[in-house]
Image (cartoon, rainbow, N blue to C red):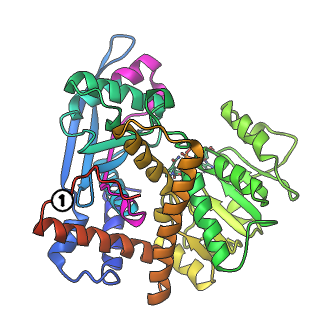
């Protein structure tokens, strides 16, 4: 996504959904789209060889209409303010569509962390936290992991926040290690949330997962965990890819074995026991269900006609372009949009925050059961609006979220917001 591209796309989708949401007030619409606060920071870093760098980081606080800002922190060379603004906006929509009492935010540093040593990575995280600690906090803005950031980095952020603020509260960040206040089930939450939505969608059509043939593009956290859940439910994973190759097996890939293989940072292209194809080939397999779980912009107007799956579950953020949406809709493909299908991660992040604030520890079964209830409710609200208005699930998901954000802004103008520690489970 080029400079100014991502945020413009976010605004265009919000504009398109606003009339469905009944938002005719252009001032209100501008408020919904525009970030409340944008922080840009310079981050000094001393490398192991003694050389010094000054990196750029961001924290965009998009909407607090429904609760504290919530969203990940990304370390990537392509991070731009435009991208972080769009990602923050999408978080406001995502938290609203699943109706958790949080807003949207996002952070990022323009850096390739693969070139950093462990010490440099920790120093970078602590330096970034030093720049933003005054604007985050357990009741204000709660970061989480995103691309190239993990539980260990979140532990450092919480620790640095505690030393700077004098408030050693694990609820300042989610996605931590379980030993430092992380929630059970957070690692598989995105895949499980998508799985819950898919099960509900199939049931609504009188179908189930048994015997369904599945292709997965991207066998990382989201894709591999989805493969494991689908296999357990009786589906057959016939194709799966990483960035180096796709593996194909018509009677089903051994997904647990492949997940363990990927945990060792190995590449599919080296697995000579399997039929191998190009990394993008899962998109075109003759399957019932396609799961894009790698990158944005994979299904476009130029290749959408070659997608043969009847169902698409978007576990990556933004894998389908708006032009491709139209092609797929024309062909009657059931598409479960990213804004809903990937929301399991932020829901379990919210659970982690609640557990930390209340000094509780929930069992894994409890986390999974509560997640299923929230995903199911969101799916029902979105499908009901899509049916009523005869629109796509993507547009309906945005409209449901926009209605909730608009209501919260209007309510906030009438009276101060209720305590944000109110739990709505
Ligand atoms: P990850 O880094 O764990 O895995 C990504 C996988 O995609 C890897 O196996 C990689 O080899 C593969 N890949 C990369 N480029 C590819 C290509 N061109 N063709 C085929 N495979 C390719 O990342 P992840 O956390 O699983 O995230 C994947 C997507 O899911 C991203 O779009 C991310 O934004 C989205 N997502 C993830 C979460 C989460 O909690 N992990 C939450 C919301 C959205």
Frontmost residue, 387 versus 105: 387
Residue 118 in the magenta stretch? The answer is: yes
Identify the secondary structure beneath mark 1: loop
Residue located 82% across and 66% down the image: 211
User: Measured from the top left, where is residue 22 in percent x and y?
Assistant: 28, 83
Frontmost residue, 98 versus 125: 98
User: Measured from the top left, where is residue 51 in percent x and y?
Assistant: 32, 15
Q: Which residues are magenta?
A: 95-123
Q: Is residue 301 left or right of residue 216?
A: left
Residue located 43% across and 63% down the image: 98
User: Measured from the top left, where is residue 266 in percent x and y?
Assistant: 70, 33
Residue located 21% across and 31% down the image: 131
Confirm whether residue 222 shows in the render: yes
Q: Residues within 10 Å of mark 1 (few under 14, many from 20)?
A: some
Quadrant in the rendering for residue 140: top left
Residue 392 in the magenta stretch? The answer is: no
Image height of 10 relative to 166, above or below: below
Residue located 44% across and 27% down the image: 180
Image height of 203 relative to 79, above or below: below
Check disc 1 and report the residue beneath it.
417
């Amino acid at each position: 996504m080029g400079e100014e591209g991502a945020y413009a796309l976010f605004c265009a989708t919000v504009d398109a959904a606003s009339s469905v949401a009944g938002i005719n007030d252009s001032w209100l619409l501008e408020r919904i789209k525009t970030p409340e606060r944008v922080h840009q920071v310079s981050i000094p870093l001393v490398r192991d060889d003694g050389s010094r760098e000054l990196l750029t980081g961001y924290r965009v606080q998009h909407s607090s209409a429904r609760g504290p800002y919530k969203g990940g922190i990304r370390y990537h060379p392509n991070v731009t303010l435009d991208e972080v603004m769009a990602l923050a906006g999408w978080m406001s929509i995502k938290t609203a569509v699943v109706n958790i009492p949080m807003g949207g935010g996002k952070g990022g540093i323009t850096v390739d962390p693969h070139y950093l040593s462990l010490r440099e990575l920790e120093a970078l995280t602590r330096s970034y936290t030093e720049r933003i600690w005054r604007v985050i906090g357990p009741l204000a803005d709660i970061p989480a992991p995103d691309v190239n950031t993990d539980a260990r980095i979140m532990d450092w952020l919480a620790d640095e926040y505690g030393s700077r603020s004098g408030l050693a509260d694990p609820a300042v960040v989610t996605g931590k290690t379980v030993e430092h206040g992380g929630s059970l089930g957070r690692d598989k939450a995105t895949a499980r949330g998508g799985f819950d939505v898919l099960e509900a969608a199939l049931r609504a059509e009188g179908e189930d997962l048994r015997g369904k043939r599945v292709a997965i593009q991207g066998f990382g956290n989201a894709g591999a965990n989805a493969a494991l859940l689908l296999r357990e439910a009786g589906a057959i994973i016939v194709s799966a890819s990483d960035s180096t190759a796709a593996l194909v097996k018509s009677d089903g890939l051994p997904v647990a074995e492949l997940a363990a293989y990927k945990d060792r940072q190995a590449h599919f292209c080296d697995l000579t026991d399997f039929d191998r194809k190009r990394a993008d080939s899962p998109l075109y397999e003759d399957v019932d269900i396609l799961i894009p779980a790698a990158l944005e912009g994979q299904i476009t107007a130029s290749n959408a006609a070659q997608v043969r799956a009847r169902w698409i579950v978007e576990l990556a953020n933004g894998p389908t372009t708006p032009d491709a949406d139209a092609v797929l809709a024309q062909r009657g493909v059931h598409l479960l949009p990213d804004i809903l299908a990937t929301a399991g991660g932020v829901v379990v992040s919210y659970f982690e925050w609640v557990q930390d604030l209340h000094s509780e520890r929930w069992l894994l079964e409890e986390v999974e059961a509560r997640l299923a209830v929230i995903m199911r409710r969101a799916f029902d609200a979105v499908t009901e609006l899509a049916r009523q208005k005869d629109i796509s699930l993507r547009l309906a998901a945005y409209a449901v979220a926009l209605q909730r954000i608009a209501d919260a802004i209007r309510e906030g103008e009438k009276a101060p917001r209720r305590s944000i520690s109110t739990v709505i489970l």
